[in-house]
Image (cartoon, grey):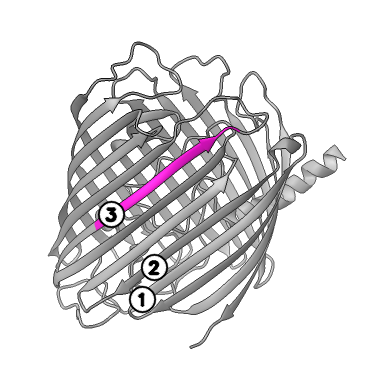
Amino acid sequence: MRLLSCLLVAVLSTATVLGQSQGNGSATSPSTSSSSAPAPAYGYIPLTSNAQTDTSTDVSNPNTPWLPVLINGEMMPLLGEVERSNQLSIGMTVASGYDDNTLTQNDRQIGNASFSFLPSVSWHESRSRSLFDFNYSPGFTVNQKLPDLNNATHNAGLNSQFRLTQNVTWRIHDAFVASNSGWTNSNPEIPGNALNEPNQQVLTPLANTVSNSAGTDLVYQMGAGTILGGSGSYSLLNYSNVQDGPGVQLIDSRKTGAEAFYQHRLLPKHWIGMTYGFQRFTFNGGVEETYTHSAFLFYTAMIQPHFVVSLFGGATHTQTDGFVAIVTSGPTTPGTRTQWSPSAGATFGWETRHTGITATFSRRIDSGGGILGTVERNSGMATVQRQFSPNWTGTIGFVYDNNRPLDGVGGEYRTLSGTVAVERRLGRQMSASASYTRAHQTYGIAIPTQLFPDHNRAMLSISYLFSRPLGQ
């Protein structure tokens, strides 16, 4: 029976990783695009196949690509553009996985097989002046050795934009996740941003987790090569202990932010710009509170239609009151502290008909992902996706994340993980996938319960997706 369970784990869990795209090195849809246009900045109105980014761009065309790729830290998707359509999709993923350290504890390592049932529904509508994406996936997971940890999950996302006038676009996006697993802590359908992505790479000990990230952007095109914009964002991350968990209370956090940016095209394929941002972090209801003011300079180059590089750098001023961490390495200083910190980063995107590569790196001030309060965070991600044939797609992903508390008394926290996945299409509506993830975590302070060990995780899954066009 145990052997049969492990075999089912291997067959079912892969579709979960690729079919539902979990946060750690997950892949997007393996669809390809024959268009010669540059890949769009994800979340904004996509480019048409004959779009160009030279000074002769017609701003009266509702499909004009007046937002450059990777603007203001945006990260591009892999393999394909958003197609103009209006359709409803309903799916089901049956998955199985095996984690050799489900409780995330060195002194109590338990290998566990899990079985998940993940229905999903999504609605996509793309028109010349609007884009709307909504997805919702409830689910239920049954654990073989830890029945007390059987749980329901909820994963929902909204991404919409509206071209209000010829020169003004408004975007709204939101992502919600509720789970008791650190592996399902993000919604990949929501646009990523190298400056503002949530700190959810930490594989925390078992806890009931609720996260929500919402934002809005308003972008105004002053001319054929000049853009002004502003954005606001709000995110929360709440934890509560689960039965049979480690008994350590993780840190709740809230983040509120606002940005204003300016972007100008120097040459047909070269953009420069600047961004000013304000953020407020609060932890455990105000035990620690931080205000930040940041200024960045940007440079974006579309070296080729499918090869884009964006660089940014600047400085951040922080003012912190109080202190919070699950463990400290020395005396804390709960009074007001101020400092300047350098911030920098880069995003890279390269795409061909069958291969896509994206990579990001950033150094910035952020929240500590449930382990620490305000941190200096160095993070990097790289994903390579290759379509070997019409039915086979492979993905390799790497994640590096280092969090250091601003006052240096909480101990650095590091995460290094790698994922290998393969997906096989079983027809127009079915697919199967398999993946393996290795995660290595270290914390700079010895913790009695040793909450941050390594993980080896294998997944298999089978997915069915039915799509139906709506209207015209």
Question: Does residue 29 appear anywhere in the picture?
Answer: yes
- The residue tagged 3 is 232
From this view, report whether residue 325 is shown above or below residue 308: above
The spot of residue 214 in percent (x, y) is 38, 54
Q: Residue at x 59, y 40 (%)?
A: 181
- Viewport quadrant of the N terminus: top right
Q: Locate residue 252, reporting x and y percent.
A: 44, 35
Question: Secondary structure of the magenta portion, mostly?
Answer: strand
Q: Which mark is residue 160?
A: 2
Magenta-drawn stretch contains 235: yes
Q: Amino acid at mark 3?
A: Gly
When asked about the image quadrant of residue 388, the answer is bottom right
Amino acid beneath label 2: Ser
Q: Nearer the viewer, residue 437 or 452?
A: 452
Whether tag 1 and tag 3 are in contact, CB under 8 A, the answer is: no
User: Closer to the camera, 154 or 227?
Assistant: 154
Question: Most extreme residue toward the bottom, as rendered?
Answer: 472
Please say if the residues under marks 1 and 2 sit with CB atoms less than 8 Å apart: yes
Residue 68 visible to an observer of this rendering:
no
- Say which element carries label 3: strand
* Residue on which disc 1 sits: 130
Residue, far right:
1
224 to the left or right of 159: left
Q: Is 330 rendered above or below residue 143?
A: above
Please state the extent of the stretch shown in magenta in the rendering.
231-241
Q: Is residue 258 above or below residue 82?
A: above
Callout 2: SS:
strand
For the residue labelled by badge 1, is the local secondary structure a helix, a strand or a loop? strand
